[in-house]
Image (cartoon, helix red, strand yellow):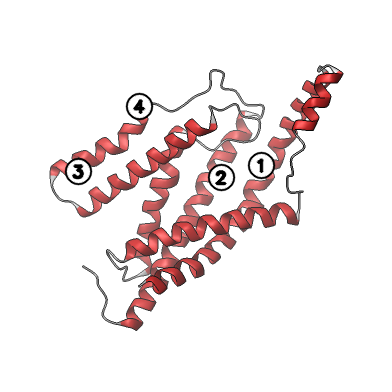
Amino acid sequence: MFTRILTTACFTGAIAALLLTLMQSLWISPLILQAEVYENAQTVHEHVHEQHADSHEHEHNNETWAPEDGWQRTLSIFAGDLVVAIGFALVLSALYNLRTPITPLHGMLWGMAGYIAFCLAPAAGLPPELPGTMAAELSSRQDWWVATALATAMALALLAFSRHWFWRLSAIVLIAAPHLVGVPLPADHHALVPDELLAQFRMASLLVNAVFWVVLGGLSGWWFWKQHAADGPLNIA
């Protein structure tokens, strides 16, 4: 079972990561590069008004490595996508032991559940942001994102596997709870980029992630089913 989960995650995660990197390079990265132009222009403007002593210290503190545009950036994106894709594929493959998919469509449904839990629900409160956007403290946003993803995943599980009204009502409460508690917001929320560019980026991010999750679910479901069928009778309870 462990071998089946691991091989499914590595094989399908790598393919999904390649697709995700390709979509990001063609659609997401150009939007980020446009936003970085506004962010860099603002940084230059601020440096002009700094005193010489302070500007020297500021430049020294910001000497951090970043991948250059081109193959370095693409390779860095792929490395991150690969880790994320294999990690999510491991979660899906482990869940397939509870209810084995018998067609790629079932895997796609699992993938859509992952998309709702890990992308759509958190994005309802914390939409994807471009460089140059003022946001709340990173740790508070991470905590809210994790709580929202876990609550939504638990709610979807209750809706899918329970029939009692109490658990279904509990699922609705779980979905709404993080949003009722409130999203961490900065005191002054503004963006350097135009609203049109920000809206385009958010839409592109949601669509790209939707394709990624559907492909990851479909591939992992098909591959898991194929290995399971070769090992013995399917468990489709």
Q: Residue furthest right?
A: 52
Which kind of residue does numbered mark 2 sit on?
Answer: Ala
Marks 4 and 3, how far apart at CA: 20 Å
Q: How many other residues sit within 10 Å of disc 3, few (<14), some (14-19) or many (≥20)? A: some
**Who comes first in sequence, dot 3 or dot 2?**
3
**Who comes first in sequence, dot 1 or dot 2?**
1
**Disc 4 or disc 1, which is closer to the eye?**
4
Point out residue 156 in the picture as x, y percentages from the top left corner: 29, 48
Pointers 4 and 1 in contact (CB under 8 A)?
Answer: no
| 49 w.r.t. 149: above or below | above
Q: How many other residues sit within 10 Å of disc 4, few (<14), some (14-19) or many (≥20)? A: few
Marks 2 and 4, how far apart at CA: 28 Å
Residue 42 as seen in the image, left or right of residue 225: right
| 5 w.r.t. 27: above or below | below
Point out residue 122 in the picture as x, y percentages from the top left corner: 43, 39
Q: Which residue is mark 3?
A: 168
**Disc 4 or disc 3, which is closer to the eye?**
4
Q: Please, what secondary structure does the residue beneath circle 4 have?
A: helix
**Disc 2 or disc 4, which is closer to the eye?**
4
Q: Which circle marks residue 204 in the picture?
A: 2
Residue 204 lies in quadrant: top right
Q: Please, what secondary structure does the residue beneath circle 2 have?
A: helix
**Who comes first in sequence, dot 2 or dot 4?**
4
Q: Which circle marks residue 181 in the picture?
A: 4
Residue 20 as seen in the image, left or right of residue 100: right
Marks 1 and 2, how far apart at CA: 9 Å
Point out residue 93 in the picture as x, y percentages from the top left corner: 38, 64
Q: Which residue is mark 1?
A: 31
Marks 3 and 2, how far apart at CA: 32 Å
Residue 181 as seen in the image, left or right of residue 6: left
Quadrant into which the N terminus falls:
bottom left
